[in-house]
Image: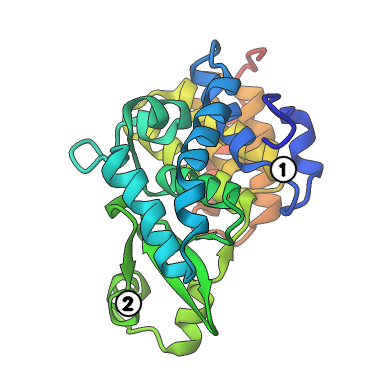
C-alpha cells in the first residue's frame, strides 16, 4: 500500500494488470468484508515497523540467503509468526488483519507478510503457487532460494520440492522442466484468488452459504471470467434461494465450459430452475 492507507475499490480491480494490482491493500480489502472496522493504517505501519527493525542488520549482510535468514529469524522466531498447524482451516488464518494480531496464519497469508517485509527492505521475493502449500522464492545466482513460510521460512532443496509436488502430479516425480514451471512466480492476482478460494472452501465445508457466495463474488471482482467462481456463486445463490442469480451464473459457466465434468448435471438443474419462481436479490 505505497500511497499510505487507502484500500482499493472492488470495482476497479478487474481492470488492473497483475503488476499493479495491490497485494497488501486487496488482502486487507478482503478482510474488511468480515471486519468492517478494520484500520488499514495500523497494518501498514506494523509492516513498516517490522522492516525498520531489520533494516540496519539486513543492510550489513551481503549474501541474499543470509539476508533472508535474518528476516525469517526476526519474523518467525522473535516476532512469533507461525503456521496454524492446530487449526489449519480456521478462517482467521486467511484474513490478514487476524494474522497480524494473532501471529498465526496459513501458507499464503504468512507468505504475504514475509514478502511485504522483504520488499520494503528492497529485496526481490515472489510467491509460488506450489501444489499443496504456498511457498516463496528469491533469486540466488542463476537459481532460486525456495522457502516455506508456513514452517518458519525453512529453505527447501530440490529433492524435497520434487517429493512435495509428486502426490499432486499423479505420483509422477516432476522432471527439471516441470519443476521449473511449478516454481514460476505467482502474480498478485493469482495469490489473491488462491486466498479467496481457500476461504470459499472453508465456508462451503461449514455450509455458511452467505460467506461462501461472498468469496466467489470477490473472485469475480478480480477476474470476471473465472468459470469456477461463476459456478460457485451460482450454486451459492441456489442454496440461498436466489433463483435468478443462480440461473445467470450457471448459464454463463456452461457457456465458458460446455464440456465441463459437471455440465450435464448443471444443465439439468437449469431446466428445473426454469419452472421455479425467481426471488429478487
Q: Residue at x 62, y 57 (%)?
A: 187
Q: Seen in the image, is 47 located left or right of residue 148? A: right
Q: Which of labels 1 and 2 is toward the front?
A: 2
Observer-nearest of 211 and 100: 100
Look at mark 1 in the image and give the residue it sits on.
Answer: 224
The quarter in which the C terminus is drawn is top right
In the image, residue 212 above or below residue 125: above
Colour treatment of the image = rainbow
Locate the N terminus by quadrant: top right
Q: Is residue 246 positioned above or below 73 on the image?
A: above
Provide residue 168's location: percent of width, then percent of height. Answer: 35, 69
| Horizontal arrangement in the rendering, residue 6 relative to residue 46 (left or right) | right
Q: Mark 1 or mark 2: which comes first in sequence?
A: 2
The image shows residue 40 at horizontal and vertical percentages of 59, 22
- Let me know if residue 253 appears in the view: yes
Measured as percent of width and height from the top left, residue 114 is found at 46, 48
Which residue carries the number 2 mark? 157
Q: Secondary structure at mark 2?
A: loop
Q: Name the secondary structure under disc 1.
A: loop
Amino acid at each position: 500500500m505505497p500511497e499510505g492507507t487507502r484500500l482499493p475499490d472492488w470495482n476497479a480491480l478487474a481492470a488492473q494488470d497483475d503488476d499493479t494490482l495491490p497485494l497488501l491493500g486487496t488482502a486487507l480489502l478482503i478482510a474488511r468484508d468480515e471486519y468492517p472496522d478494520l484500520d488499514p493504517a495500523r497494518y501498514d505501519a506494523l509492516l513498516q515497523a517490522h522492516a525498520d527493525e531489520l533494516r540496519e542488520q539486513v543492510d550489513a549482510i551481503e549474501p541474499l540467503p543470509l539476508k533472508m535468514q535474518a528476516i525469517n529469524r526476526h519474523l518467525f522466531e522473535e516476532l512469533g509468526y507461525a503456521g496454524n498447524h492446530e487449526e489449519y482451516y480456521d478462517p482467521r488464518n486467511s484474513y490478514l488483519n487476524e494474522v497480524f494480531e494473532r501471529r498465526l496464519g496459513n501458507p499464503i497469508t504468512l507468505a504475504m507478510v514475509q514478502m511485504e517485509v522483504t520488499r520494503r527492505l528492497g529485496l526481490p521475493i515472489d510467491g509460488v503457487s506450489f501444489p499443496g502449500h504456498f511457498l516463496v522464492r528469491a533469486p540466488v545466482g542463476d537459481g532460486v532460494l525456495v522457502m516455506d513460510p508456513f514452517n518458519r521460512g525453512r529453505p527447501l532443496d530440490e529433492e524435497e520440492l520434487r517429493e512435495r509436488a509428486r502426490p499432486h502430479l499423479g505420483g509422477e516425480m516432476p522432471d527439471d522442466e516441470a519443476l521449473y514451471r511449478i516454481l514460476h512466480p505467482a502474480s498478485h492476482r493469482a495469490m489473491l484468488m488462491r486466498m479467496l478460494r481457500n476461504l470459499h472452501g472453508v465456508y462451503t465445508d461449514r455450509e455458511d452459504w452467505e460467506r461462501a457466495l461472498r468469496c466467489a463474488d470477490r473472485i469475480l471482482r478480480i477476474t470476471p471470467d473465472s468459470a469456477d467462481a461463476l459456478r460457485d456463486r451460482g450454486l451459492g445463490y441456489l442454496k440461498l434461494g436466489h433463483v435468478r442469480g443462480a440461473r445467470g451464473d450457471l448459464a454463463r459457466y456452461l457457456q465458458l465450459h460446455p464440456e465441463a465434468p459437471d455440465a450435464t448435471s448443471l444443465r439439468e438443474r437449469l431446466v428445473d430452475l426454469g419452472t421455479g419462481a425467481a426471488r429478487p436479490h
